[in-house]
Image (tube, helix red, strand yellow):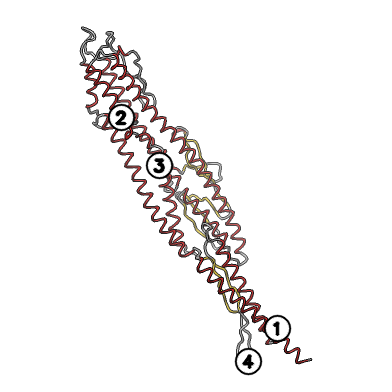
Amino acid sequence: MAINRLADIGKSALFTAQQAITVAGHNVANVNTPGYSRQEVTLAENRPENGSPGQIGTGVHAESIRRAFDSFVDAQLLASRERLGEFTASSNSLAQLESLFGDANNQGIGAGLNEFFGALQDVATNPSDLSARTVFLSKATGLAARLNQSDADLTAAQGSINRQLGQTITDANRLTSQIADLNAKIAAAESHGQHANDLRDQRGVALAGLGELIEVSSIEDATGQLTVFAGRGQVLVDKERNYQLVGVPDPGNNGLLAVHYDAGTGATSNLSSVIQSGKLKGLLDVRDQTIPSLRASLDALSSEIVTQVNQQHRSGFGLDGSTNINFFAPTGTTAGTMAVSLTNVRQIAGSSTAIGVPGNNANVLALADLRNQDFASLGNATFQEYYSTTAGSFGSTLQGVEGNLKAQQILHDQLTSQRASISGVSMDEELANLLQYQRSFEAASRMIVIADEMFQTILSIKR
């Protein structure tokens, strides 16, 4: 019996070493797998047998295979992903709008304003010069075109962000469905006493991906299943069931998508105003706040330019004696609709009188002087000052977002490194483990050989 016991001990050691080698190999194979948590074998002694002069050991077994995991660090990393998703989306969306302010290369609205009033000054210098008038008309058309293009760019950017919003909603629904499916698989595995390590890692990756899209929180029940919440408590995943986010066109916001929550009752509720972080938050902020604010500023600037220039222009006289003519189309009082209506350069009203046409340059000087006037509708600022304030405000917003993104990226990298130190795979450590378990396997094999040799010796004595 003692020889059989020795063989059983060797067999248990052999199988246990084999399991440990398998786990170490699994760790090595997944060293580069995103979200993978290093797994560890917990060894325990087999129940001893009573004997003389005392209890005799019966070997070893693998008690469990657990993953190296720190729930606090993972929770911090999830919160970091939410903010990183928000700032990344905001930064990328704002970057699409930088072309609106191309004044550094004389392509922006500020440069257009300077060229417009500079050309007016040239007309004042020689009011009868048709070439100067032609240049001025061209610069006015160019200024209107720049404002038109800016409005078109804002509309295009808003449409692009709206499409991203729809895709993000689809991605979020895909991830909630994946989490619900993994919940069922984890519950099924762990109900039989298993540790669903790999399934939990996959669910963690899906939850992290969802956190990049929308603010989430979660609670795990006794069966290992997660209930995932979004916004201010809406349930996205309830064990094996997931609830949908829906993009619903909002008539009050030009038909742009609003993020709605579908509780499965047939009615949806709007979540847009309560989303606090994640990619959806960044997209919504730029689409519904930054872009409308920029459009309102450019519309106010366009309206004031059209109103003031037309008012002054109507009081003057052209080379052909014409008067009371609008320079800009009076109905085009937004950045998108602003247009020059005057086409005949002789009708540019440079003179304050029709006597002795071409007359004087008093009216064109008054038009040029609009450049230096403050307007109440623009916050008691000149045209250029108002535009510079708008551009500066956008620049500050962009710098703030980029600063937040850099700071959050640093924090995220630190948390990622902290998680790696806990859950990551060290190749050196795993190779050392492989060598250790290989030696254990060899020793266990040798033990079985010794038991067999002892048994053969006893058989030979009986012969």
Q: Secondary structure at mark 2?
A: helix
Residue with the mark numbered 2: 111
Marks 1 and 2, how far apart at CA: 95 Å
Left or right, 203 with respect to 155, comes to right
**Among numbered discs 1 and 2, the one appearing first in the sequence:** 2
**Among numbered discs 4 and 3, the one appearing first in the sequence:** 4
Residue with the mark numbered 4: 52
Marks 4 and 1, how far apart at CA: 23 Å
Left or right, 383 with respect to 443, comes to left
355 in relation to 12, above or below: above
Residue with the mark numbered 3: 285
Q: Position of residue 36 (x, y in %)?
A: 53, 60
**Among numbered discs 4 and 1, the one appearing first in the sequence:** 4
50 in relation to 154, above or below: below
Q: Mark 1 packing: few (<14 Cα in 10 Å), some, or many (20+)?
A: some
Q: Position of residue 364 (x, y in %)?
A: 24, 18
